[in-house]
Amino acid sequence: ISREKLMKKIAIIGAGISGLFIANLFKKNSNYQISIYEKNNSINLDEGYGIQLSVNSVKLLNKIGFYKFNDEKKFNPDKINFYSIKSTKKICDLDISYFNSKDCKYTTLKRSDLINFLNKDVKDLIKHSHSISQIEHENHKIKLTFENRENSECDYLIISDGVFSNSKNLISKNPTQPKYNNTLAIRGMIPNSPKIDYKNISLFLGPDFHQVIYPVSQNGDLNFIAIMRYELTLEKQKNYSLFSESSFIKKVLENVPKENKVFFENVKELKIFPVFVSSDFFETKNDNINLIGDAFFAFQPSFAQGASQSIESAYELFKSIENNTEGNYFKSRVYKTKMVNNRSKFNQFAFHLSSPLTTFFRNIFLKRLVKNKKFLESYLGKIYNN
């Protein structure tokens, strides 16, 4: 039997963080032949978009050489500073370097720089402008049909095409649909300012609103993201062009707490996105078809675990395919995802409190909890120490 026949064929749908990372992992194993199918004609490199990577994901990225990644293009903040929007006074700070080790440190960087790093060794495996139209599976073989009429067969299908996964719709008559989280994300970059601790993460808490500012490189670039409660009709949720209309952006920015308007004056490349989150888990009926990243589950952005969990889910699936234990992947991923999701929901609730009395007590608890090692080991350690 030729070596080619013994090789297992892996098809990956979607060239985002999770899809590119798992491709890098499989590329190191000569038993697998990999193809990545991406519906867009190029990889999305959105410059003004920072991400945070906690030590659980940095440890996994190091397996494909992230420790050699250009130090100029990443930053290692030591703490999160908590501020109250109303008084702009610092409430307390949380030492996130507590979970660091010599080679694995909490890292912030531009999403585009991480994508470039993940892309460099697998770019020859990506087939662009390949939008999937049909998925059939029988006798352990999976047949893919694309809108350009191309066909392909594989032994394993890995779905990593995001929160609005089209592939998920193709393998189920009624997959769980993402739901609008009643919040908008306002993103951009801001220049360095004496008002900001540019070496750490700054988190501002306010009624139905929070914003995060953090460095994404060594040259003073600061990422800005605000999460604002905002009701949208079903029609508006589906009208994606609405979010780039100047009249809509102006209307949204009028709702920014007046104490925070000063930050918005300096935001460059400002973009607004509706936040969609997963409402439930979708289990495939075939062990050889699996979901990772946002296609598996999309969190609300209040625990900074979106990218880290995409990387973690990709690694877990890679190990389960390599060890022939695919049936265990779904259960173990659901367990970890529920933990992260519960913390994300709780964080957003705590960050957005509006009553002066509950805010007062929240701040007292925060001051105590950030210094309580037992609490930190439980609340953060269970997520960061994979």
Image (spheres, rainbow, N blue to C red):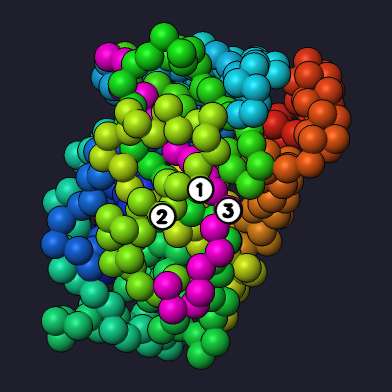
Of pointers 3 and 1, the one earlier in the residue sequence = 3
As rendered, which of 306 and 27 lies closer to the eye? 306
Check residue 233 for magenta coloring: yes
Q: Amino acid at mark 2?
A: Lys
Callout 2 touching callout 1 (CB < 8 Å): yes
Q: Give the residue number, with chain letter if any, for mark 1.
A: 255
Check residue 346 for magenta coloring: no
Q: Quadrant of the N terminus?
A: bottom left
Q: Amino acid at mark 3?
A: Arg
Q: Is residue 212 visible?
A: no
- The residue drawn where x is 54% and y is 81% is 175
Q: Is residue 248 above or below residue 188?
A: below
**What secondary structure is marked by label 3?**
strand
- The residue drawn where x is 23% and y is 68% is 39
Q: Give the residue number, with chain letter if any, for mark 3.
A: 229
Q: Is residue 160 above or below residue 211?
A: below
Q: Position of residue 43 (x, y in %)?
A: 20, 52
| Cα–Cα gap, marks 3 and 1 | 9 Å
Does residue 350 appear left or right of residue 368 in this picture? Answer: left
Q: Residues within 10 Å of mark 2 (few under 14, many from 20)?
A: few
Q: Is residue 296 above or below residue 250?
A: below
| Cα–Cα gap, marks 3 and 2 | 13 Å
Q: Position of residue 231 (x, y in %)?
A: 56, 64
Start-end of magenta stretch: 219-236
Q: Position of residue 298 (x, y in %)?
A: 53, 58
Give the quadrant of residue 56: top right
**What secondary structure is marked by label 1?**
loop
Q: Amino acid at mark 1?
A: Asn
As rendered, which of 78 and 315 lies closer to the eye? 78
Q: Is residue 357 visible?
A: yes
Q: Give the residue number, with chain letter if any, for mark 2.
A: 251
Callout 3 touching callout 1 (CB < 8 Å): no
